[in-house]
Image: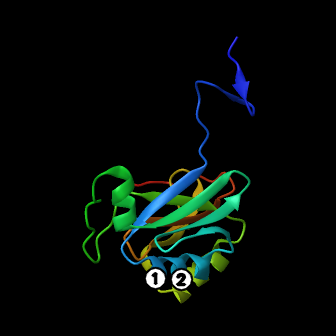
Amino acid sequence: MACCLNGVAEHQAELSLIILAVSDLARSIEFYRGVFDWRQTVETPFYVEFELGPGLGVGLYQREGFARNVGQMPSPVPTGELTSTEIYFRTQHPHKLIAKLDQVGARVLSPIALRDWGDEAAYFADPDGNVIVIASDGGGRIAQTKV
């Protein structure tokens, strides 16, 4: 019988924090504050952290500070390019968040549409090329794809 800690089996892990390396911390803070109503829980000159809900947060780390922790500078992302990171948010009111993304100047990658997996989702890029998805349950409808 496996022993548990806070309801999680000792051999499993619980996601608690997503950290993004950013090139301009002030710009990224302004971007994410302008879109989401997250409570900020940590602020240092090189790092901020927001609480998304109980036990889950998003951190924004200036690239140089991030590199000190991991021992290597993350690869730069050229302007207009994307990272391989996608953060997928579900909401009952996607158009409100999409309007906020438009207000902060997020780059539209794909407008809201019914996707093959049944969600309605819109894709944007944050200032560092991380992909932000705003989705709502498409009501179980599955998009028809053309072959």
Left or right, 6 with respect to 18, comes to: right
Residue beneath disc 1 = 27
The residue drawn where x is 61% and y is 48% is: 16
Q: Amino acid at mark 2?
A: Glu
Residue 36 lies in what quarter of the image? bottom right
The residue drawn where x is 71% and y is 24% is: 4
Residue 57 lies in what quarter of the image? bottom right
Marker count (numbered):
2
Position of residue 46 measured from the top left corner of the image (x, y, whole percent) = 46, 71
Give 112 or 92, whichever is nearer the viewer.
92
Q: Amino acid at mark 1?
A: Arg
User: What is the number of the mark on residue 118?
Assistant: none
The residue drawn where x is 64% and y is 71% is: 94
Residue beneath disc 2 = 30
Quarter the N terminus occupies: top right
Give 78 or 111, whichever is nearer the viewer.
78
Position of residue 129 measured from the top left corner of the image (x, y, whole percent) = 37, 70
Does 2 appear above or below 19? above
Q: Residues within 10 Å of mark 2 (few under 14, many from 20)?
A: few
Q: Secondary structure at mark 1?
A: helix
**How many angstroms separate mark 2 from mark 1 (CA)?**
5 Å
Contact, CB < 8 Å: mark 2 with mark 1?
Answer: yes
Residue lying at the far bottom of the rendered structure: 103
Q: Is residue 147 visible?
A: no
Position of residue 37 measured from the top left corner of the image (x, y, whole percent) = 69, 74
Q: Residues within 10 Å of mark 1 (few under 14, many from 20)?
A: few
Does 143 appear above or below 49? above
